[in-house]
Image: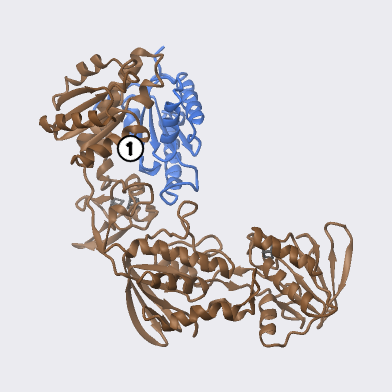
Chain colours: A blue, B brown
Amino acid sequence: MNQPRILIFACKWCGFIGADAAGKKRTSLPSQFRIIPVECASLVETDAILRALAGGIDGIAVLGCHIGGCRYNNANHTAIKRLELLQDLLDTTGIGRSRLLLSFGTAHEDYQFEEIIKNFFDELILLPPLDPWLSPFGVIS
Amino acid sequence: MANISVFLCKCFGEIDNTVDFDFLRKELSKNPSIVLISTVDSLCLETDIEKTVSRIKESNSEKVLIAACSILSRGNLVVESLIKEGIERHKIGLVDIREGCAWIHGDDPAGVTKKAKDLINIGIAALQHKELSDDMSVTVHPNALIIGAGPAGLAAAISLAKTRFKVNILERSKAPGGMLRLISRCYPGNEDASNKLEPYIREVENNPLITFYPQSKIASIEGDTGNFTVHFSSQEKDSSIKSGVIIIATGAKIFFPTGLYGYGEIKNVITQMEFERQILNGSLETKKPVFIQCVGARDKKRPYCSTICCPISLKNASRIAEDVPGASVFILHRGIMTPGNTLEKYYRDTLASGVQFIRFEEEHPPRIIGSDHVESVEVYDAITGITRKIETDLVVLSTPLVPNNDNAQLAKMMDIEVDRYGFFSEIYPMHPLETKTDGIFICGSARWPVSSDNSILQGKAAAMKAVSYLRQSKITASTLSRVPGLKAGHARVVTESCTGCGNCVAACPFNACHLEKMEGRYISVVNMMKCKACGSCVSVCPNGSVQIPEHNYRMVGEMIKMAF
Ligand code: SF4
Ligand code: SF4
Ligand code: SF4
């Protein structure tokens, strides 16, 4: 069966470090994920997530620092609120909140990153593939 | 689209044993903007860097993409070496195909090569669409403003003057010294407060670099890092000062325990501060004092420990025990807080001086017996479970320090924050003494209750942090980063499409955006000296009018397209 496709927005100061550490340890991971490092999770625009889902990417993960540990004066706090609203929106549109994984402060270590990604794959594999959707942006795939 | 040269690093087999480089070359050569694809054994070796640089210069490429290891491994070194060779930072892209690809997907030969290809394409998309933020710099006024002339402020002033910077001190009261003027001795050395203060006062009075403004009141503060203007009045006269940095050393105030333990009604129930005053004016007469700790502290309303009241009680209790013949001194406490080696010794010395300690619980506070004059104190000893009655002639209440009333107002003027109690907040835990606004520092009890020794220490530390700003003649906005290295950029507003909705203003955690009237409508303006490129504004703008050029929405969109 085809592996689901996952796009990860990883804060440079947390999730990205966890991902990097997993790499240094040569942890074996499914290959179908791509990381876009961001300065802060608050930089992840909701429409970037929607575009990615519209383009047929099966799951999006946003990895940021723990509350109180943001390098940008609690910018991650508002990011969480915003992205949780987006999860609600995904539920109401039928895409489902489970396609947007939020993890704040829980992916800083290699084993944490590994576990989060593997679990996310396991969850997404149960869902039907998200076909690219013809959108005003054009088909993204 | 700019011409790009791509360098694939083999890392001596670490990458190319897993990733099929021939396939990569074939795929990449389909992209017309790639003018050079070069494979290198190990990019981080000096010889290979040289080769790379000359190849870049020979090719007609404008930008360079390095596909090698992670930025947290040797990748950064490669990028920095290229920058040293004259290639601009924003024209270099780094893609990690080792830690993030070859090393973790070795058991999936098809997947690993496809991922490497995708990652490189993401990198190319990023490089093609990345823009460069604007920058600005500010001329630094090489002098410091210190608010508050207690031990913290005085120590900061003198340290700054030693480094030859001019200092202006604004003080609320008539004379410098702060709380040291109200007490007789300082713990833990039992030094006379006036002796401790004397050299500081002398220095402030005689040092030509230090100007002292008594009875001053701040009206407003404007400007940014390196260039603040403070409008204030001193002794009823209005004036303003320009200043490169501001150090807040406004201290804290004593909590008055009105209504607690009969304070205010029963005559010989006093606070620790009144005890000090009685020592100073020689009116203290007690043989059987009882000190009660944590009065108005470590409770529901103020769940913090003020840290100074336990040592103060030790100081005053042992003084009576040692100086007054036949004295019987009690400290009723909820756990004595004396961290560190000097304070622990202080506690042991107090024990040895004959002071008796009884521990009580929050639920069973001691009871004062007597109507207008206290006769005894009844306390339930939490350790033995016995209720004891202690004869006394004076009850001294140890109350915590609480924040000054005008902290929030002052913080607002400077765009900084106060904590949930009202003390000034620092950037915890990574940037002690620093506030949300670069160039504004906090020290002493304005930040959190501390002893005079610690106030002095923090004052000096704040001064040294301030010097790092003052010694620059110009401060460039992009260097005001809170993370290692330079800032990631600055937010930029597209004036044409901004509707002035103010979402960005509300979301910015650094108060860097504000609305300004322009041609009859409001638009958002970003202050680059404050912006830290967190991107909060970008995410809340309803029409994409604010962007971080280094991470703009077009770039992210193209990166997503290339992801699989
Ligand atoms: S220092 Fe002592 S008296 Fe003061 S709040 Fe802390 S425990 Fe209570
Ligand atoms: S929200 Fe962040 S990126 Fe936007 S102006 Fe404020 S500090 Fe800069
Ligand atoms: S959120 Fe966007 S439209 Fe609203 S004021 Fe800020 S830049 Fe302008």
From the viewer's perspective, tell me whether residue B343 is left or right of residue B439.
right
**Quadrant of picture, ligand 1:** bottom right
Q: Which of A81 and B378 is in front in this view?
A: B378
> Foreground residue, B233 or B345?
B345
Residue A55 locus on image (x, y percent) = 31, 26
- Tag count in the figure? 1
Quadrant location, the N terminus of chain B: top left
Relative height, residue B314 to residue B201 (above, below): above
Instruction: Specify the quadrant of the image occupied by residue A23.
Output: top left
The residue depicted at 24 percent of the width and 52 percent of the height is: B498
Report the quarter where the C terminus of chain B lies.
top left
Q: Name the residue under label 1.
A: A47
Residue visible at 25% across and 34% down?
A: B93
Q: Is residue B293 above or below residue B50?
A: below
Instruction: Note whether residue B224 is visible.
Output: yes
Q: Which chain carries label 1?
A: A
| Residue B256 in the figure: left or right of residue B137 | right
Disc 1 crowd rating (10 Å Cα; few below 14, some 14-19, many 20+) is some
Q: Which quadrant of the figure has residue B345?
A: bottom right
Horizontal placement of B393 versus A117: left or right? right
Q: In this view, does B178 lie above or below B537?
A: below
Q: In this view, does B495 lie above or below B107?
A: below
Residue B323 spot, x, y in % from top left: 77, 79
Q: Which quadrant of the structure image shows residue B401? A: bottom right
Where disc 1 sits, the SS reads: helix
Image location (x, y in percent) of residue B152 = 50, 70
> Percent x, y for residue B156?
45, 70
Check disc 1 and give the amino acid type.
Asp
**Which of the pair B431/A16 is nearer the observer?**
B431
Q: Residue at x 63, y 64 (%)?
A: B306
From this viewpoint, is residue A133 visible?
no
